[in-house]
């Protein structure tokens, strides 16, 4: 599954000159935690989040080395944010973005690793959508039938070129059981690895998955360390 499959195309955005009060009003009225700042050419310049506005609301300087240094940069950036009156002055820039063709798993990993709640989706730098943690949660909550369909159509057929009829795929509460026989052990391990990456899959049981030829055994023998003496 790709970002384009889950992103929201109707994106609330602001211009660099938008007053910060107006940005705050949009966040409250739209029930969102951040908004992209977009230039006249449609390119994403940054993001104003609730955190940026809360930092402005504090209105006080913090001692050197405070945790805000990590979140908002050094003294100069923090001072500018305290004095911010427009979106451009308050935004965090450059914005973390993602392209619509990237895997959903990559979006999830970026959000977790960089501690952000949303990623503007861009094509050649221009805003085309936005994906949020809520969007990823909805993907994870998909039905077992949806998961089975993606495993059969996207993972087996389109990605690995394996006819879905070769394998048994059972899904119950997000837990996938794989069965059947493939030509090589490599194919079997690839199937397990790709299925585990499908958003919404909780676990994969491949104990019933078999292969006719163990193509990894010779490779493991060749790469084994030589014995002493």
Image (cartoon, helix red, strand yellow):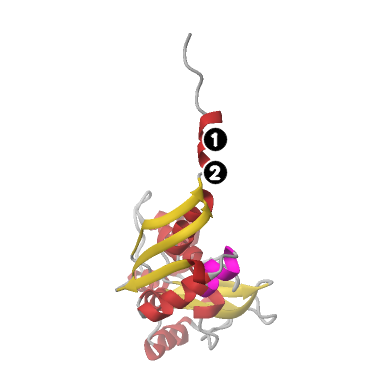
As measured in the structure, the alpha-carbon distance from the residue carrying label 1 to the one carrying label 2 is: 7 Å
For residue 151, which numbered disc appears in the image? Answer: none
Establish if 148 lies above or below 113: below
Q: Where is residue 216 in the image (x, y as percent from the top left)?
A: 52, 41
Magenta-span inclusion, residue 159: yes
According to the picture, the residue beneath numbered tag 2 turns out to be 215
Q: Position of residue 227 (x, y in %)?
A: 47, 16
Label 1 Cα neighbours within 10 Å, binned few <14 / some 14-19 / many ≥20: few
Residue name at image x 41 percent, y 74 percent: 136
- In the image, the segment drawn in magenta is 153-160
Q: Where is residue 224 in the image (x, y as percent from the top left)?
A: 50, 27
Establish if 51 lies above or below 27: above
Residue 91 visible in the snapshot: no
Residue name at image x 54 percent, y 35 percent: 218
> Image quarter for residue 67?
bottom left
Furthest toward the bottom, the residue is 29
Furthest toward the top, the residue is 229
Residue name at image x 56 percent, y 81 percent: 129
Residue name at image x 47 percent, y 62 percent: 110
Q: Is mark 2 on a helix, strand or loop?
A: loop
> Image quarter for residue 32?
bottom left
- Confirm or deny contact between disc 1 and disc 2 (CB under 8 A): yes
According to the picture, the residue beneath numbered tag 1 turns out to be 218
- The answer to which of 103 and 113 lies nearer the viewer is 103
């Amino acid at each position: 599954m790709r970002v384009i499959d889950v992103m929201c195309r109707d994106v609330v955005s602001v211009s660099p000159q938008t007053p910060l009060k107006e940005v705050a009003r949009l966040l409250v009225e739209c029930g969102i935690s951040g908004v992209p700042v977009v230039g006249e050419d449609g390119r994403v310049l940054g993001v104003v989040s609730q955190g940026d506005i809360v930092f402005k609301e504090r209105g006080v300087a913090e001692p050197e080395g405070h945790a805000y240094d990590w979140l908002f940069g050094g003294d100069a950036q923090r001072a500018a944010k305290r004095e911010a009156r427009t979106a451009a002055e308050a935004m965090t820039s450059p914005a973390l973005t993602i392209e619509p063709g990237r895997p959903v798993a990559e979006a999830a990993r970026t959000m977790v690793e960089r501690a952000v709640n949303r990623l503007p989706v861009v094509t050649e730098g221009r805003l085309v959508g936005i994906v949020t943690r809520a969007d990823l949660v909805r993907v994870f909550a998909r039905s077992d039938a949806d998961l089975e369909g993606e495993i059969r159509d996207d993972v087996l057929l389109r990605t690995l070129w394996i006819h879905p009829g070769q394998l048994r795929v059972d899904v119950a509460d997000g837990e996938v059981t794989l069965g059947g026989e493939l030509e090589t052990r490599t194919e079997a391990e690839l199937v397990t690895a790709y299925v585990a990456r499908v958003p919404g899959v909780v676990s994969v049981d491949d104990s019933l998955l078999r292969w006719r030829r163990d193509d990894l055994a010779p490779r493991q023998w060749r790469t084994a360390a030589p014995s002493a003496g």
